Image (spheres, grey):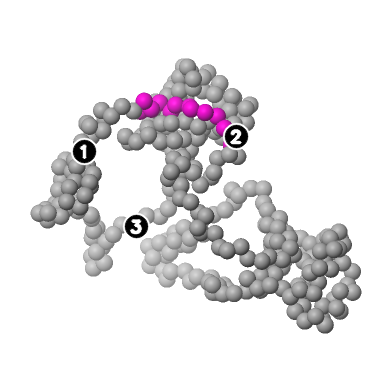
Amino acid sequence: MPSAIWSGAISFGLVTIPIKVISATEDHSIHFHQVHLEDMGRVRTRKVCEIDGEAVPQEEIGKGYELTKEQTIPVTDDELDQIPLPTAKAIEIAAFVDADTIDPVRIGDSYYLAADGQVAAKPYTLLRRALERSDKVAIAKFAWHNRERLGLLRVRDNAIVLHAMRWPDEIRDPSELAPKEPELDEKEIEQAVQLANSMTIDDISGFRDAYRDALEELIEAKSEGKEPPQPAEGEEQKPGQVVDLMAALNASVERAKEARGETDEHATVHEMKPRKKAAAKKTAKKAPSKKAAAKKPTAKKTAGRKPRSA
């Protein structure tokens, strides 16, 4: 278990729970150094004063707030420490809410909260069971690095997890990003839902970082003096290419079901309706599927339509 990055207490009404904060995630990314290509010497970042051009040692570096382009206000660490901050050493629970009312875009980094000593075991377990039985999450305020933050507490595998959250005014309004509502055929929507259903899985623990795996192979090959592995050949995708939306949905559903081993007649994808009306009349004589029969009025209305392009 990694070392604690913060210690304090959970304030739950009049209950105090001593806890230690431990990061819930690990960074497995491969990191590089900047080097001089001629001799592989490390290239390091030097902190230089832009006025005199001299390198500045760490003990001479402080904080400053740029009030205007001509005026910077110095702020010391002592001044920051003296600012009243009630949540400086406590994670103060302010409210309980239903989990589905929290917008995921507001959730940030995750941390495990471990009971700090045996004295904390009983109140820690009490809060954990209260969260489980109420089927709610707790909204809390806490302060790290001289800044008050908002957090969410929930239970994961008998441990209480703290998710850092964004304040409401930190979330940008996405309304201007949505495109103008296009016309969609009901059949297109149904096929998109069918694609989502065919791609549904119960467990995502099998996902791997393919780029990191390839990067490790590259580093291993170069360290052994071998030729780097060649990338696998695949279909080149052209971004921005306009495709037949219905044809793409049908092909995607078929591919997803083949990948899941669904090859019986119930997994057959409905054929794409041809563009020509004459050909459409011939295909209309085919026996409809159970799903199509159940929605006969809709099928009549859309039978003569040409498939729309995206």
Q: Secondary structure at mark 3?
A: loop
The x and y percentages for residue 177 are: 51, 59
Label 1, residues with CA under 10 Å away: few <14, some 14-19, many ≥20: few
Residue type beneath disc 2: Asp
Quarter holding the C terminus is bottom right
> Label 1, label 2: how many angstroms apart (C-alpha)?
40 Å
Residue of label 3: 32
Residue of label 1: 75
For the record, the magenta segment spans: 86-99
Q: Are marks 3 and 1 in contact (CB under 8 Å)?
A: no
Residue type beneath disc 1: Val
Q: Within the magenta stretch, is there residue 141? A: no
**In this view, 205 is above or below 158:** below
The x and y percentages for residue 87 are: 38, 27
Q: Which mark is residue 136?
A: none
**In this view, 178 is above or below 310:** above
The x and y percentages for residue 69 are: 20, 52
The x and y percentages for residue 194 are: 72, 59
Residue of label 2: 98
Q: Secondary structure at mark 2?
A: strand
> Label 2, label 3: how many angstroms apart (C-alpha)?
43 Å
Q: Magenta part mainly helix, strand or loop? A: strand
N-terminal label among 2 and 3: 3
> Label 3, label 1: how many angstroms apart (C-alpha)?
34 Å
Nearest-to-viewer mark from 2 and 3 = 2
Looking at the image, which residue is at 64% across and 48% down? 203
Residue type beneath disc 3: Phe
